[in-house]
Image (cartoon, rainbow, N blue to C red):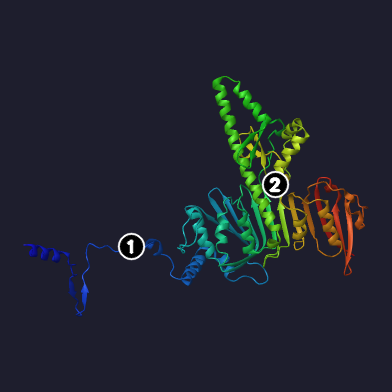
Amino acid sequence: MDREGSSKSAEEEKPKEPVVVEKASGEPKKAEDPTTKKRPRKNEDLLKDAPETSDDEDQRAETAGSRNYPANLWNRLKNPPANRPTIDVWEFKLDGEVLTMTFTCDGEKYPMYFTPRSVIDFQMRNNYWIPRHNNTFKSLRTRLYSLPKTVSINKLVFSNTPECEAEDCLIELMFIKKWTCKQLDYNICTEFNQPQHLRRLVHMFKPTDITVSLHFGPYIPSATAHEPNSMHNHLAALSDTTLAMEKDFRLDCAHALSLPPDSSKKELGMLYGEAGKGRAFGIQMLRTLTAIRKFVGMMAEKRMAQTKGVAIRKFVVNGPGIHDKPCAKLQQLLKEDGLDEANKMRGAYATGERVYVCVRNDLRRAFKYSLAMPATAFKMSIGNEQLLLFTKSVPVFHCFFRTNVDEQGVVQLITEWQKGERNIEEIQLHLDRVIEPNFVDHLNADHADPKRVKVRRVVNGRKTTLYIERDRLGSRHLALRTLDTK
């Protein structure tokens, strides 16, 4: 019995051989086990419509481009004119959820609109990153890829692109397309906190003229608004995202606490709500101003200004314009606190430690929150060394924000120009301190003109005159301009 039991267990332990089925050709084939399942291919659904090769993808892009671009524009893109740019103006603008891309050629505009419901022209490779997986930028990406590999642009304009998604779509094609532009015009109409995108656009398009403009922040009164009679409070948004209420705001909160319980609760809720929204606006402005300062600092560095293939001739950083003024009510509050405290608060704003915000009683959202101090009083990280280094290769430089440049740096700049060691066309800066008009008398300056101070030089028989605006020196503004004279 033991032998029979052991033989049965040995037979059970032997592996079962698969059944062999004879094929028609006589070759044996193993039968498939119905219990085993095939391993599914990864990303099979995503890859089924993707192009097999880059040539196939380029062919799909060109086919989509000839179908989606207007015939006149596509003909110009494929057959660019000689000795002038292919596109006069190329503009990107985001309005709500609609992104508008506009081409201007010979005075005729070709706008294209992209929304989350836009149709995707063709399926691209899967290693392309789509911002937020949004169809707006997915369709923009395919439309951009359809453009020819070599395109010259006279002026590239960006307006109101807060999250830099349109810039992302362009930058990712940096090593695929050879696009160049003469002028880069970047308009900041809302929060901007990604200066590296702007720097990559400079590397990609290699512009000779760069203009960065800030178009929001100060209060812009309407024609019907009675601004002097409007009541408003002030608060400070700190760099650590905390909030500090100013004296007038604290007084209103104390008054609300003294009211009956029902009225007090309602009034305090309204005040705290306004304070929270004002703090959000202040943090938004602080991030934007800090990002502008970082980009200007990167441009002023030697490795950025003299990057291979980037020959910058003009660099302009504009402030908000004529409405960029300090709030009169906040200035009065600062006077009440004393001169030392007022200077301390202004210094904290200039260095970026805090931003002061006006919270107005106007119900319109566009005017309710604004900067209480001038945006141009925010200090850029440009000193004498950066100014002398940057203007060595950039003859036109405007920075309408406060800098660390003082009299010593300006004197050295003009002295080197007079000796012929550098060329200057036009320089405008906000200085750190007031400079007296006689600071260049040792260079034989001419004070005959009541409006301008003149400094002359002769280099290789060529006479040039440097004009210094006399009146603007009193407001810490340096304005230099050179002209050839006979």
Occupied quadrant, residue 245: top right
Occupied quadrant, residue 446: bottom right
Q: How many marks?
A: 2
Left or right: 147 with respect to 361?
left
Q: Are marks 1 and 2 in contact (CB under 8 Å)?
A: no
In this view, the residue in front, 235 or 153, is: 235
Question: Where's residue 478, x and y in %?
Answer: 81, 51
Name which residue type carries label 2.
Pro
Q: Residues within 10 Å of mark 2 (few under 14, many from 20)?
A: some
Q: Closer to the N terminus: mark 1 or mark 2?
A: 1
Question: Where's residue 50, x and y in %?
Answer: 43, 65
Which quadrant does the N terminus fall into?
Answer: bottom left
Left or right: 144 with respect to 232?
left
Left or right: 195 with respect to 401?
left
Identify the residue under disc 1: 40
Residue at image coords 9%, 62%: 5
The dot on residue 320 is 2
366 w.r.t. 267: above or below:
below
